[in-house]
Amino acid sequence: MGPFCAGSVAHTHVHSVVQDIIKTKGRAMEVVTHFVNDTVEFYKWSLTIADKRVENWPMMSCPIPTLAISCLYLFFLWAGPRYMQDRQPYTLRKTLIVYNFSMVVLNFYIAKELLLGSRAAGYSYLCQPVNYSNDVNEVRIASALWWYYISKGVEFLDTVFFILRKKFNQVSFLHVYHHCTMFILWWIGIKWVPGGQSFFGATINSSIHVLMYGYYGLAALGPQMQRYLWWKKYLTIIQMIQFHVTIGHAGHSLYTGCPFPTWMQWALIGYAVTFIILFANFYYHAYRRKPSSKQKGGKPITNGNTVVTNGHNNAEESEDGKKRQKKERAKRE
């Protein structure tokens, strides 16, 4: 075979390879296009079974605002520490006091509305289907659940305060996982099932948040409150009990055939299992494992469903104050 023939064969082979690559890319693009189209069609179909009562409520017409806020939150997780890297940490003591006690009020309002509304509507604690009517009590429950969803967005400030105070170690995987997923998942909950058994978990969780943000608010008042805050360990225990109750409640509904959306029940079980695993790991490291000499200064506690303090650790703040004073003296010298 001459050089010309060999070159022709090589050219033909390269051309064949290029054609195969083009065909492969074409098939991949076709698969992606079909997936996107199917997803859009599924979303359009899902809107036909969404709750019409909430479609004109703030943030509920489409998921874009919720997803945008969640993306901004994730961006701040990346940009915030870089912004604070060469800056002094903020104290934010008064801000934290106002924030924590405001969250106490908000969560108390949510728990109160859910309890009174469910009682007036004659809800069952074992099996309660969703009632999509405009009954005053059903709308009251849906409204309280919407506020519960909004509170999950407000809780992004927990992370913001940690980063502004340069408590980067407090922004754990559990912290981010909880905050980011709860806001998105509860948008889904309000869009399709803002009532029925959805009230059960939200009532328990908002009640626990009253205790937790109350704890953080008291801690933010200063060291003189520490003698009254001996019960911080039990906040984590209560949270773990909450997740087990959620699994048992959803499991009972599935076993008895309760006419509440099955997909929601399985989602609750799966989500609760992830938290049990993460919280058990946290509890072991925070309260069971013997701390090393470097860790004896303080232990983290949970915030809401997170593995961190909510922005006020007196020991850390006093230590930070000493460091700042030393730096200022060094600069003056």
Image: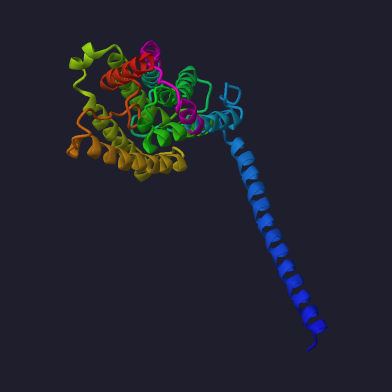
Whether residue 56 is visible? yes
Q: Position of residue 61 (x, y in %)?
A: 61, 27
Q: Position of residue 83 (x, y in %)?
A: 49, 27
Extreme residue in the bottom direction: 1
Describe residue 271's horizontal placement relative to residue 215 as left or right.
right
Q: Position of residue 287 (x, y in %)?
A: 20, 34
What range of the chain is rendered magenta?
Answer: 78-106
Q: Residue at x 22, y 33 (%)?
A: 295
Extreme residue in the right direction: 4
For residue 59, which quarter of the picture?
top right
Q: Residue at x 35, y 45 (%)?
A: 255
| Colouring chosen for the image of the structure | rainbow
Residue 243 part of the magenta segment: no
Q: Residue at x 31, y 43 (%)?
A: 277
Describe residue 58's horizontal placement relative to residue 84 as left or right.
right
For residue 315, which quarter of the picture?
top left
Describe residue 141's horizontal placement relative to residue 49 as left or right.
left
* 225 relative to 258, above or below: above
